[in-house]
C-alpha cells in the first residue's frame, strides 16, 4: 500500500491544512432528555459525523461540523452530564461555564411540554450573566398546539423562546438562520499568545499556596525581573528568572497583593482563572497535598486541559504529608487525575522550599512537548505498524481503514487521521496511548481529529 499512501499524501495534507482553519463554535446546553442530541443531529444533518474530540481529556465531549447556507460552524455537545458524580448544581455550572468560556454562541434547550424546571432555571441564572450570546430553544413543539405553552418560557429571562421540534424538523431551518445571525464570522481567539518570555498561569483553588510559591520563586536567591529588552511588561504580570530563563507569570497582581477572594464569588474567581489560562502557554496547577483532592481542584484541571495548555501539577504542602496521607493521595490521584495521565508532577513545599528546583525542568519538558512536531513520514510509518498489529474494530460489518495521518498543528500537538469509516472512542484512545509511547508529549495534551471520507 506504500504507493497508495504517497499518492494521497499531497491531497490529504492540503485538506488537513484546511482543517486547522477554525470555525465559530455553537454550544448546546440543557438538562438531560430535553432533546439536545436529537437537535445536534438535526443541526448537522446526519448521524455520527465525529470530526473532533479530545480523547482522555474531555471524555466524550465532541464537536461536529455543520453547514447551513454555505457557512460552516462547529456544534459542541457539552455532554459531561454526570450529576451523580458531581451534584446537579455543579454539573449545571460546569456545563454553562464551559460553554460561556469556549463557545461563540450558546443554545439553552428546554422541553416546552414540561415547562421551566428548577434545573432549567439554574442554567438560565448563570447564562443571564453571559457575554456570549444565548438563544433559548423551546424543543418538542411538535404542533402549533404546544406553541402557546412555550410562551411561559419567557420567564427564564433569556428573551424569546424559539420553538422547534428537533424530532420532526419543525422550524429548525428558522433556528439555523437565527444561529447564523448570532454567530460571529470568525471564532473567538483562544490561541495562546506567541513570543517573549514563556507565559505561565499559576492556578488552583484558594489557599493551596499559589502566592507562597510565587514568593518563593521570586524571592531570595531568585530575582524578580522588572524589564526585559523588547518586551512591555503588563503590570499585572510578574517576570521571574528561573533556571537561566525569564518566565512571565501572568495575572499575578492579585497573588502579589494578597487580595483575598472574599470579595468575588467562585464564579468570578473561575473567570479570572480561565483568562489567566488563556493568556498562558503553560499552567502550573497547585493542589494542597495535605487535603483530599476536591471537585474545585478538578474544575481548574478541566479548564487547563480543555484550553489545551501544557501542564505541571504541583502537589504543595509536602511538609505536611506523612506516610498515611501519601498512601491516600496516591489513591486519590489514580481515581481523580486519570484525565491527565500525561501531566508533569512535582511534590513541593512552598513553605520550606523543598524540591522547588524540580519545577523548572518539569515546566521545560511540558513546553517542549507542547511545541513538538512529528514529521509526516515518521508519523505514518508508526501508524502503519500500529494499525497492522492492532486494526480498529469492525463497524457495521466493515473494517475502517486509516489511510493517513498528519500533524496539523502544535501548541498543543494536533493530529488529523483520515479514515474510511468510523473510529470508536476506545480505539482513538488506544491510538493516543501508543502515540504517546512512541513520541512522548509528557506534560502536553494531544488532540486527535478524525476526518471520515465516505
Ligand atoms: P438529551 O438527553 O437532551 O440529549 O435528549 P435526547 O435528544 O436524547 O432526547 C430525549 C428524548 O426526547 C428522546 O426520546 C427523543 O426522541 C425525544 N425528543 C427529542 N426531540 C423531540 C421533539 O422535538 N419532540 C418530541 N416529541 N420528542 C423529542
Ligand atoms: P493561595 O490562596 O493559593 O495564594 O495560598 P497562600 O499562598 O496564601 O497559602 C495559604 C496558606 O497555606 C498560608 O497560610 C500559607 O502559609 C500556607 N502554605 C502555603 N504553602 C505551604 C506549604 O508548602 N506548607 C505548609 N505547611 N503551608 C503552606
Image (tube, rainbow, N blue to C red):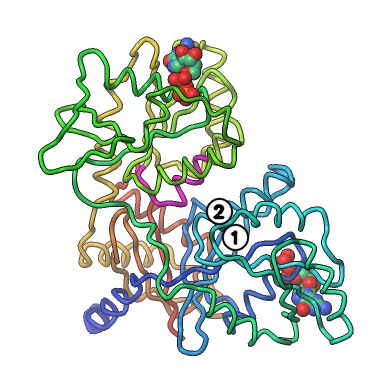
How crowded pointer 2 is (Cα within 10 Å; few <14, some 14-19, many 20+) is rated as some
What is the C-alpha distance between the residues marked 2 and 1? Answer: 8 Å
338 with respect to 403 (left or right): right
Left/right of residue 334 with respect to residue 310 in the rendered view: right
Magenta highlight: main SS:
helix
- Quarter of the image for the N terminus: give it: bottom left
Residue 57 in percent (x, y) is at 49, 51
Taking the spot 73% from the left edge, 80% from the top edge, the residue there is: 164
Label 2 element class: helix
The residue that appears at 65% across and 48% down in the rendered structure is 93
Circle 2 is placed at which residue position?
A: 98
Badge 1 marks a residue whose secondary structure is: loop
Q: Can the viewer see residue 149 in this picture?
A: yes
User: Badge 1 is on which residue?
Assistant: 78
Q: Is residue 255 positioned above or below 103 on the image?
A: above
Q: Say if the magenta span includes residue 257.
A: no
Q: Determine the residue positioned at 55% across, 41% down.
A: 268
The magenta segment = 300-310
Location of residue 255 (image quadrant): top left
Camera-nearest residue between 399 and 437: 437
Asked if the residue under mark 1 is in contact with the one under mark 2, i.e. CB atoms within 8 Å, the reply is: yes
Amino acid at each position: 500500500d506504500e504507493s497508495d499512501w504517497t499518492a494521497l499524501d499531497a491531497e490529504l495534507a492540503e485538506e488537513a491544512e484546511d482543517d486547522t482553519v477554525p470555525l465559530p463554535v455553537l454550544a448546546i446546553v440543557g438538562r438531560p432528555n430535553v432533546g439536545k442530541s436529537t437537535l445536534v443531529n438535526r443541526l448537522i444533518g446526519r448521524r455520527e459525523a465525529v470530526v473532533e474530540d479530545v480523547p482522555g481529556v474531555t471524555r466524550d465531549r465532541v464537536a461536529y461540523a455543520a453547514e447551513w447556507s454555505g457557512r460552516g460552524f462547529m456544534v459542541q455537545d457539552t455532554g459531561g452530564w454526570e450529576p451523580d458524580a458531581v451534584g446537579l448544581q455543579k454539573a449545571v455550572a460546569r456545563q454553562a461555564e464551559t460553554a460561556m468560556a469556549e463557545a461563540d454562541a450558546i443554545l439553552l434547550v428546554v422541553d416546552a411540554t414540561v415547562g421551566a424546571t428548577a434545573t432549567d432555571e439554574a442554567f438560565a441564572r448563570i447564562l443571564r450573566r453571559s457575554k456570549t450570546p444565548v438563544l433559548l430553544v423551546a424543543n418538542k413543539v411538535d404542533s402549533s398546539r404546544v406553541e402557546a405553552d412555550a410562551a411561559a418560557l419567557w420567564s427564564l429571562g433569556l428573551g424569546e423562546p424559539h420553538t422547534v421540534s428537533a424530532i420532526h424538523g419543525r422550524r429548525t431551518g428558522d433556528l439555523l438562520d437565527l444561529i447564523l445571525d448570532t454567530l460571529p464570522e470568525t471564532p473567538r481567539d483562544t490561541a495562546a499568545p506567541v513570543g517573549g518570555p514563556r507565559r505561565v498561569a499559576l492556578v488552583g483553588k484558594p489557599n493551596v499556596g499559589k502566592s507562597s510559591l510565587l514568593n518563593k520563586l521570586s524571592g531570595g536567591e531568585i530575582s524578580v525581573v522588572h524589564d526585559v529588552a523588547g518586551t512591555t511588561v503588563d503590570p499585572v504580570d510578574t517576570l521571574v528568572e528561573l533556571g537561566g530563563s525569564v518566565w512571565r507569570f501572568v495575572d499575578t497582581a492579585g497573588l502579589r497583593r494578597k487580595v483575598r477572594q472574599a470579595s468575588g464569588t467562585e464564579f468570578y474567581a473561575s473567570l479570572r482563572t480561565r483568562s489567566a489560562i488563556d493568556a498562558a502557554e503553560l499552567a502550573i496547577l497547585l493542589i494542597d497535598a495535605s487535603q483530599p483532592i476536591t471537585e474545585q481542584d478538578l474544575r481548574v484541571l478541566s479548564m487547563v486541559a480543555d484550553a489545551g495548555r501544557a501542564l505541571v501539577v504541583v502537589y504543595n504542602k509536602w511538609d505536611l504529608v506523612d506516610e498515611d496521607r501519601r498512601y491516600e493521595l496516591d489513591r486519590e490521584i489514580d481515581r481523580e487525575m486519570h484525565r491527565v495521565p500525561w501531566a508533569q508532577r512535582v511534590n513541593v513545599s512552598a513553605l520550606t522550599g523543598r524540591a522547588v528546583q524540580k519545577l523548572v525542568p518539569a515546566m521545560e519538558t511540558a513546553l517542549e512537548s507542547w511545541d513538538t512536531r512529528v514529521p509526516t513520514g515518521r508519523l505514518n510509518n508508526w501508524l502503519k505498524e500500529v494499525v497492522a498489529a492492532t486494526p480498529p474494530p469492525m463497524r457495521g460489518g466493515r473494517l475502517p481503514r486509516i489511510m493517513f495521518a498528519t500533524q496539523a498543528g502544535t501548541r498543543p500537538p494536533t493530529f488529523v487521521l483520515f479514515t474510511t469509516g468510523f473510529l470508536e472512542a476506545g480505539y482513538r484512545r488506544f491510538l493516543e496511548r501508543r502515540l504517546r509511547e512512541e513520541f512522548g508529549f509528557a506534560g502536553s495534551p494531544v488532540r486527535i481529529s478524525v476526518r471520515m471520507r465516505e
